[in-house]
């Protein structure tokens, strides 16, 4: 009986371990994206998070739900970034390229940073192995 209970416990543990690893990976990748932006562009963590969030918010506004789901799967921590954008925008929408520049201005970022963020974000989405997500994101951010 003890062997049966031990075997069941091992099976249950094994069933949950992959999910834990995926969760840790997703959290690590989210931090990796923020770190990538801060290092490459010399911005603060809050500027990186807010800028990424504003871009993802614009993509969410422009894409169908199914297409945005593909983008969200390619960018770990999407909900964290969208929460940051919600705070930045006071719950409003980005709307268009001018709205994106306005959001960046609120973060203390110059308009030329929009293109730099876009490049990093779309490359990051593509590196997840989802070139379609990268294409969808690039199209939404035009």
Image (cartoon, rainbow, N blue to C red):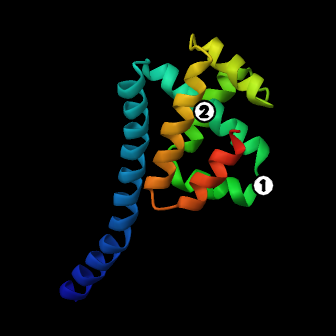
Is residue 118 placed above or below 136 in the rendered structure? above
Q: Residue at x 33, y 66 (%)?
A: 17
- Residue at x 37%, y 31% (from the top left corner): 35
Q: Left or right: where does residue 137 sit relative to residue 120? A: right
Q: Residue 53 carries which label?
A: 2
- Secondary structure, mark 1, is loop
Vertically, is 66 above or below 56?
Answer: below
Which labelled disc corresponds to residue 12? none
x and y percentages locating residue 102 in the rendered image:
71, 17
Residue 141 in view? yes
Q: Is residue 19 left or right of residue 14?
A: right
Residue 22 lies, in percent from the top left, at 39, 59
Check the picture and name the quadrant holding the N terminus.
bottom left
Q: Is residue 74 above or below residue 120?
A: below
In depth, the one of 70 and 119 nearer the eye is 119
Question: Residue 66 vs residue 16: left or right?
Answer: right
Residue 84: x %, y % from top left:
60, 28
Residue 36, image quadrant:
top left
How many labels sit on residues? 2
**Is the C-beta separation of discs 1 and 2 under 8 Å?**
no
**Crowd band around label 1 with a 10 angstrom C-alpha radius: few (<14), some (14–19), many (20+):** few
Identify the element where label 2 is drawn.
Answer: helix
Q: Is residue 60 above or below residue 98?
A: below
Residue at position x 77%, y 41% in the image: 61
Q: Nearer the viewer, residue 8 or 15?
A: 15
**Dot placed on the residue nearer the N-terminal end, 1 or 2:** 2
Q: In which quarter of the image is the C terminus?
A: top right
Dot 2 crowding, Cα within 10 Å, few <14, some 14–19, many 20+: many
Q: Name the residue under label 1.
A: 64
Task: Tell me if I can see residue 76 in this picture.
Answer: no
């Amino acid at each position: 009986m003890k062997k049966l209970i031990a075997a069941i416990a091992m099976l249950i543990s094994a069933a949950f371990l992959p999910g834990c690893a995926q969760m840790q990976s997703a959290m690590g990748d989210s931090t990796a994206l923020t770190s990538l932006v801060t290092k490459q562009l010399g911005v603060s963590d809050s500027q990186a998070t807010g800028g990424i969030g504003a871009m993802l918010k614009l993509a969410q506004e422009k894409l169908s739900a199914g297409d945005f789901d593909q983008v969200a799967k390619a960018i770990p921590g999407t909900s964290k970034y969208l929460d940051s954008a919600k705070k930045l925008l006071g719950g409003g929408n980005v709307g268009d390229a001018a709205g994106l520049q306005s959001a960046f201005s609120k973060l203390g970022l110059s308009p030329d940073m929009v293109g730099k963020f876009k490049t990093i974000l779309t490359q990051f989405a593509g590196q997840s192995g989802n070139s379609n997500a990268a294409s969808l994101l690039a199209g939404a951010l035009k």
